[in-house]
């Protein structure tokens, strides 16, 4: 399935029903008085998170969603039936924006969470509300209010704990297929990944996390070169970045130090906040070099970069270092979760 992470839709809530101008007419009751009921409310439109969806492709085929109008009020103080709501299902991580004003409406991050995107119009008032001692036969009513109508932009930002960052052919797809059940396309040429892949890494029965294979970036990605601009935003929701560096680049001929420096430049240009996220260096394809040479090359790159954070040397093909890496990532995520839980209390 083609990955679709942006779509535009129109949502139209239902109009409220009109209030009724009715008078009670029964035998032997000469002064029945007004009995016009209120109109029913119009249906609203909701966007509901569905963990079973992972693209916005459905919104490319159906772009307009309209809720039902409320029914008009009737005699005998009968209130009109309310219009049925429309619930639109979307993938987790969907951000909703008003395309006319640019205002962010909200986002859906949990399964079953409902976001109100268009409110139905209220029902009108029947003439029974206008009866008074001086106006015993009121003919005034209030019409139902119009439902809201918006043109909305939907943008999907992948929800994952860990994002794999790196040049094309850096080994991201191979790593995610090694440590999870995800099966992305893997080959020995650049640009094999055309859309993000999610995988669940299970450390233990009750310990797991979600890892995202973000398509490879190239120089100029933040300015729109290649596919990178479409996917840099997916890194914004991750808690930890694994910066994969090819120790033995054959096709791009970019040494490890240049790989890191170029992608740091792209991250900063797109969103400086990405540079503040915890980021580890992971040197891949160590199996292509003799063990001593692979470690020496990695250590030289770390020294040249002045890298102060964690770094590891792995081979996804031989699975050397991959289990240790995932264990350490799991522990780091637990530490970040604990820090996030404590942080609000510190600000009191």
Image (cartoon, rainbow, N blue to C red):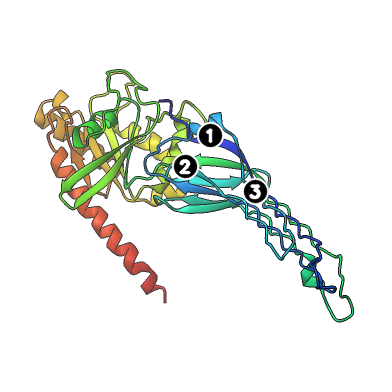
Q: Are marks 3 and 1 in contact (CB under 8 Å)?
A: no
Report which quarter residue 231 is drawn in: top left
Mark closest to the chain's N terminus, 3 or 1: 3
Circle on res. 90: 2
Locate residue 218 relative to residue 338 in the image: left or right: right
Q: Which residue is mark 3?
A: 13
Q: Which residue is mark 1?
A: 59
> What is the x, y in percent for residue 265?
43, 39
Residue name at image x 76 percent, y 64 percent: 36
Q: Quadrant of the N terminus?
A: top left
Crowd rating for badge 1 (residues with CA inside 10 Å; few <14, some 14–19, many 20+) = some
CA separation in Å, label 3 and label 1 = 18 Å
Q: Are marks 2 and 1 in contact (CB under 8 Å)?
A: yes
Residue name at image x 30 percent, y 39 percent: 243
> What is the x, y in percent for residue 307?
28, 46
Circle on res. 284: none
Locate residue 13 relative to residue 199 in the image: left or right: right
User: Which of the pair 174/57 is nearer the observer?
Assistant: 57
User: Which of the pair 232/54 is nearer the observer?
Assistant: 54
């Amino acid at each position: 399935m083609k990955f679709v992470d942006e779509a535009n839709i129109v949502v139209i809530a239902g109009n409220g029903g009109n209030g009724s101008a009715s008078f009670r007419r029964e035998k032997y009751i000469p002064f029945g008085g007004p009995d016009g009921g209120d109109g029913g409310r119009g249906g609203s439109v909701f966007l509901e998170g569905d963990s079973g969806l992972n693209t916005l492709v459905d919104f490319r085929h159906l772009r307009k969603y309209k809720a039902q109008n409320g029914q008009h009020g009737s005699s005998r103080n009968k209130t009109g039936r309310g219009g049925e709501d429309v619930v639109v299902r979307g993938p987790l991580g969907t951000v909703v924006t008003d395309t006319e004003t640019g205002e962010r409406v909200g986002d859906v991050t949990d399964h079953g969470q409902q976001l109100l995107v268009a409110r139905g119009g209220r029902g009108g008032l029947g003439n029974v509300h206008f009866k008074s001692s001086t106006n015993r036969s009121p003919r005034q009513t209030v019409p139902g209010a119009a439902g809201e109508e918006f043109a909305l932009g939907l943008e999907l930002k992948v929800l994952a704990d860990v994002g794999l960052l790196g040049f094309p052919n850096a080994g991201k797809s191979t790593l995610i297929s090694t440590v999870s059940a995800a099966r992305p396309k893997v080959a020995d040429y650049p640009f094999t990944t055309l859309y993000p892949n999610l995988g669940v890494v299970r450390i233990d029965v009750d310990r797991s996390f979600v890892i995202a294979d973000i398509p490879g970036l190239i120089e100029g990605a933040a300015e729109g070169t290649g596919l990178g601009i479409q996917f840099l935003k997916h890194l914004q929701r991750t808690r930890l970045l694994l910066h994969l560096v090819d120790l033995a680049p054959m096709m791009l001929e970019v040494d490890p130090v240049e790989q890191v420096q170029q992608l740091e430049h792209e991250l900063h240009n797109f969103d400086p906040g990405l540079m503040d996220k915890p980021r580890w260096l992971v040197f891949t394809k160590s199996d292509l070099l003799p063990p001593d040479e692979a470690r020496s090359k990695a250590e030289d790159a770390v020294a040249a970069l002045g890298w102060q954070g964690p770094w590891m040397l792995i081979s996804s093909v031989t699975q050397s270092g991959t289990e240790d890496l995932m264990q350490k990532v799991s522990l780091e995520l637990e530490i970040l979760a604990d820090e996030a839980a404590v942080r609000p209390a510190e600000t009191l």
